[in-house]
Image: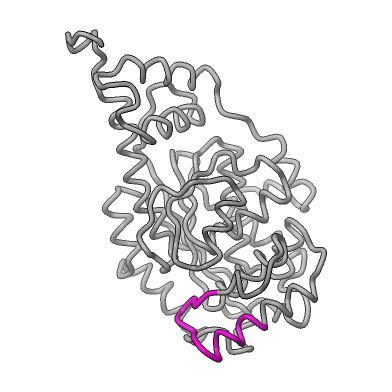
Amino acid sequence: MAQAFNSLGSFMALVQGAPDPDPMAIAGALERNGQLTKPPGALGRLEDLAAWYCGWRGDARARVSAPQIVVFAGNHGVTAQGVSAFPAEVTAQMVANFKAGGAAINQLAQLCGARMDVHALSLDTPTADFTTGPAMSEAELLEALSVGWQAVDPKADVLVTGEMGIGNTTSASAISHLLLGGSAAEWTGAGTGVVGDALALKTQVVSQAARLHAGARGLEALRCVGGRELAAMVGAMAHARVMRIPVILDGFICTAAAVCLQDAVPGALDHCLAGHVSIEPGHPALLDHLGKQPLLSLGLRLGEGSGGALAIGVLQGALACHSGMATFAEAGVAAG
């Protein structure tokens, strides 16, 4: 597949030119919803989800039948600072586990009937330690964005982006602190399980990174304190926006990546909904910033796209009811 962009400017232009949802499909979905065999509003948020999804798919009676989950993996030079409870070698080991079908996300993808793809991004070449300089060059950022862009199946009708990368909660915390302010402690959680002095060190690293790269916004923030897997998620979300494929956001790391895209191009996440809220302390604040209410709250902090995958089932349920239920006229039921 030919590369769709060769600069950050051309990437942003593609996103800025992306289509909006189809207003006729939304109107048709709302009209149909008013005729279904149920009291008005009885299916709660499922009704809103169905109309939202129908708008993006351009079909007033759409269904979710071809979900895609893409897991991106990358390694982070900042792990040299001792911010993770696991060594960087675990990233490659988990990629092998994904490919062998042995991870949690494999089971959840199978459960919801999703195609699952795994992309490892230069695991032997970690990003630079962002406490001493930018994590990536512009060329490295563009390469990662392109991997994500090209990973999206044009036949998919909903996309979940997941990640694997030792050290990437530190990256997500640094992005959040850099873009949204507050204190480093507000954005820094246990990640792989760091506590006590190790958590204090991780918080210090996040603070140091935000000071060093102060003023970086949007994709520049992603370049300075992000990671290849975060950038690939941004590329995938952006391509889905261009193709009007709805996206279900996963956890803290995925949402931090998404905030970079929204900061660069306002409205770029209109096709996204929040699959869940994790127990990483910064995640609820990121979702509040984006104005997105999570579908699920299950105390997850695994990553991999696991919360997003579970939320596919909720979206499938919404569209199964919306598009499969009989209307009052079809069922011969007297409307109230």
Q: Nearer the viewer, residue 289 or 8?
A: 289
Residue 215: image quadrant is: bottom right
Location of the C terminus by quadrant is top left
Residue placed at 80% from the left, 48% from the top?
9
Q: Which of 33 and 335 is in front in this view?
A: 335
Q: Which of 139 and 183 is in front in this view?
A: 183
User: Left or right: 201 with respect to 132?
Assistant: left
Q: Where is residue 324 in the image (x, y as percent from the top left)?
A: 26, 25
Residue placed at 70% from the left, 70% from the top?
225
190 part of magenta stretch? yes
* The furthest residue to the left: 332
Above or below: residue 115 compared with residue 125: above
Residue 239: image quadrant is: top right
111 part of magenta stretch? no
Q: Position of residue 205 (x, y in %)?
A: 67, 82
Please provide the residue range marked out in magenta: 189-204
Q: How is the image coloured?
A: one colour
Residue placed at 63% from the left, 80% from the top?
203
Q: Position of residue 334 (x, y in %)?
A: 20, 8
Total residue callouts: 0
Above or below: residue 334 compared with residue 38: above
User: Left or right: 29 with respect to 169?
Assistant: left
Q: Which of 136 and 314 is in front in this view?
A: 314
Above or below: residue 67 compared with residue 104: above
* The furthest residue to the right: 215
Q: Where is residue 140 in the image (x, y as percent from the top left)?
A: 71, 66
